[in-house]
Image (spheres, helix red, strand yellow):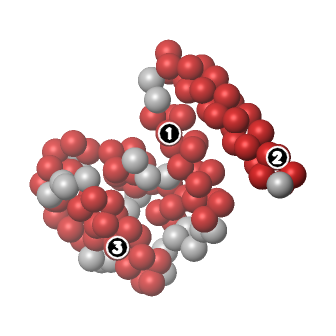
Amino acid sequence: MPIDDLTALGNTLRAARKAKSLTQEQLGDKTHISTKQIANIEKGRMNPSYLILKALAKELHLSLDSLISPELTPDEAGQNEMKLIYSNCPPEMREVLLHHTREFADELDGLSKKLETK
């Protein structure tokens, strides 16, 4: 990964960690990644392995795409967030989530059509 990409990755991870009000040590405890490794990733000094990225992304509720490709469009970022919400949902609750999401999408579609006719 080029240096600029590592810096962007580090900035994204730091911002996500702080948004969750976690210290590097707390994040390390939750992910079983050393505080030193987390600090080096956040400073753009370390190119983390897939397994490290996966553990950090899962704990910080980020998609791997958002870490690797920070230039995602808002639509792409939203799609990734929806996937992440689904995958972080307990398996036994996923159908409930999908059902309510479909109902909400139908309501939004109906509202959109009403606004178009005005």
Image height of 74 relative to 45, above or below: above
Which quarter of the picture shows residue 49? bottom left
Q: For mark 2, give the secondary structure.
A: helix
Q: For mark 3, give the secondary structure.
A: helix
> Spatial distance from mark 2 to mark 1, Cα to Cα?
27 Å
Residue labelled with disc 1: 85
Residue at x 58%, y 42% (from the top left corner):
83
Disc 2 residue type (three-letter): Lys
CB of mark 1 within 8 Å of CB of mark 3? Answer: no
CB of mark 2 within 8 Å of CB of mark 1? Answer: no
Which mark sits nearer the N-terminus, 2 or 1? 1
Q: Which circle, 2 or 1, is nearer the viewer? A: 2
> Spatial distance from mark 1 to mark 3, Cα to Cα?
22 Å
Where is residue 59 drawn, in percent x and y?
A: 33, 45
Disc 3 residue type (three-letter): Asn
- Identify the image quadrant of the C terminus: bottom right
Which mark sits nearer the N-terminus, 3 or 2? 3
Q: Which circle, 3 or 2, is nearer the viewer? A: 2
Disc 1 residue type (three-letter): Ile
Residue labelled with disc 3: 11
Comparing 110 with 62, the one in front is 110
Residue labelled with disc 2: 113
Q: Which circle, 1 or 3, is nearer the viewer? A: 1
Total tally of numbered discs in the picture: 3
Tell me, yes or no, if residue 34 can be seen here.
no
Tell me, yes or no, if residue 23 can be seen here.
yes
